[in-house]
Amino acid sequence: MKNARGQEVDDEGFARSSLTYITTKRTCVGVKISANDCVQVRNTEGTDKTTVTFTHAEWKAFIGGVKLGEFDL
């Protein structure tokens, strides 16, 4: 199944990072962006574990920080 952005999603609507398919490790993140100001993130290998929820504003701030290199090691 595909979401509105053309990404492959699981039965619950979580899209996996594209890096999941090009690395030898399968563990990655799944993200589900809802229209109701909710972004959910979870481990793709542990879907029964905790899902972390962010507002759209929090998610945009996080993505901005990633693009600016704030989390580079």
Image: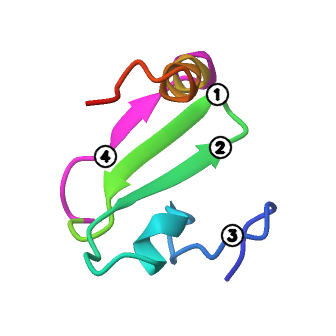
Tell me, yes or no, whether the two marked residues, 1 and 2, touch with CB atoms within 8 Å: yes
- Three-letter code for the amino acid on which mark 1 is drawn: Asp
> Which residue is the site of mark 1?
37
- The residue lying at 54 percent from left, 23 percent from top is 55
Q: Does 50 sit left or right of 23 as displayed?
A: left
Magenta segment includes 61: no
Mark with earlier residue (1, 4): 1
Q: Is residue 29 above or below residue 3?
A: above
CA distance separating discs 3 and 2:
14 Å
Image quadrant where residue 2 sits: bottom right
- The mark lying in front, picked from 3 and 4, is 3
Disc 4 crowd, CA 10 A, few/some/many (<14, 14-19, 20+)? some
- Three-letter code for the amino acid on which mark 3 is drawn: Gln
Mark with earlier residue (2, 4): 2
- The mark lying in front, picked from 3 and 2, is 3
- The mark lying in front, picked from 3 and 1, is 3
The span shown in magenta is 47-58
